[in-house]
Amino acid sequence: MGLFVFLPLVLPFTAWPIARLAEQRLHPRTTTRLLTGVAAVMAACSTVSLGLLMVVGTAQLPGNPLPDGWSDPEVRAAVPYDEVAGRLAIPALLAVLLACARTGWRHGRTRRAAHRALAGLPGTAVAVLPDETPYAYALPGRRDRVVATTGMLARLEPAERRALFAHERAHLVARHHRFLLAVQLAARANPFLRPLCTAVSYTVERWADEEAARSVGSRRAVARAIGKAALVSRSTPAPTFAGFAVPGPVPRRVAALLAPEPVPRSWPPVFTSVGLATWGAAAGTAVSALSSANSAVTMALILHAATPL
């Protein structure tokens, strides 16, 4: 197993260049899917590596319930610096599991609170809350709904309202909350993946912007709606359940909508900065997966040989 077990813990660094370049040069739909996939695979691999190191560290602790053969010199030699890295991996893996569980619990609590806030309203696709605080968001669930307050709708023109609703519906149709939850869990599993989480939070908004522009037939109308909605809601605190619609850097989104529409493509050209960054991230992801698989198989064989029949 050797040093291969440590590679998945640091290989997320290879995905940093693509986080910024992809959101600037690729279609937001492609960027969201690419970064989410890279983050999920790398997070899973780093968690597997922590688990393997924890097995070694746990086997060295006195009074552990594991077979005595697991603490033999042959097992300890399978991982370099096992006494240090193995024991450090125990609290690290526990912290990862607790952080991921907390993120999932908060996500579920937020959705439940949002649905409770709509109790008593008609079960239509668009729910209007009688609230002078201007905000709007997309609420996924068994019945997807777009939620907006009377305060927000009163401040928008009819064309801007259509753009706002089209934007929120795009979030629901593309299931953007799943991408966001996946990268949030990945960032909890490995802090080196946080730049990808930040990038995906922006690209899902850009993806919804582009879908809204195609739906209403005017990129400028969507840009106006985004800008005005951000201005009117700037001084008002967002509700705790509005976490499904993080607005992102509004000036960048407006500038992108006023520019020509991005060209959809599944993979960038190789001999470009974004192409090289994409291939680098893909290579890092592949090496991470191979390293964790190699380490897991090696550890399983060693522990199987060290376990008494």
Image (cartoon, rainbow, N blue to C red):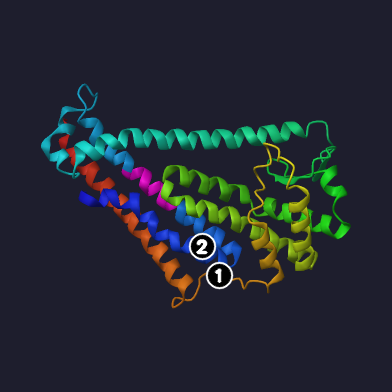
Q: Magenta stretch?
A: 41-49
Residue 185: percent from left, percent from top: 49, 43
Secondary element type, mark 2 = helix
Q: Is residue 256 magenta?
A: no
Within-10-Å neighbours for mark 2: few <14, some 14–19, many 20+: some
At label 1, the amino acid type is Arg
Q: Is residue 37 left or right of residue 8?
A: right
Within-10-Å neighbours for mark 1: few <14, some 14–19, many 20+: some
Seen at 57% across and 71% down, the residue is 265
Q: Is residue 153 left or right of residue 210?
A: right
Marked residue nearer the N-terminal end (2 or 1): 2
Q: Residue furthest left?
A: 73
Q: If the image is split into quadrants, where does the C terminus sit?
A: top left
Relative height, residue 129 to residue 273 (above, below): above
Relative height, residue 95 to residue 178 (above, below): above
Secondary element type, mark 1 = helix
Seen at 20% across and 28% down, the residue is 67
Instruction: Look at mark 2 in the image and give the residue it sits on.
Output: 20
Seen at 34% across and 52% down, the residue is 10
> Magenta stretch: dominant SS?
helix
Seen at 32% across and 39% down, the residue is 51
At label 2, the amino acid type is Arg
Instruction: Look at mark 1 in the image and give the residue it sits on.
Output: 25
Q: CA distance from mark 2 to mark 1?
A: 9 Å
Query: Decide: marks 2, 1 in contact (CB < 8 A)?
Result: no
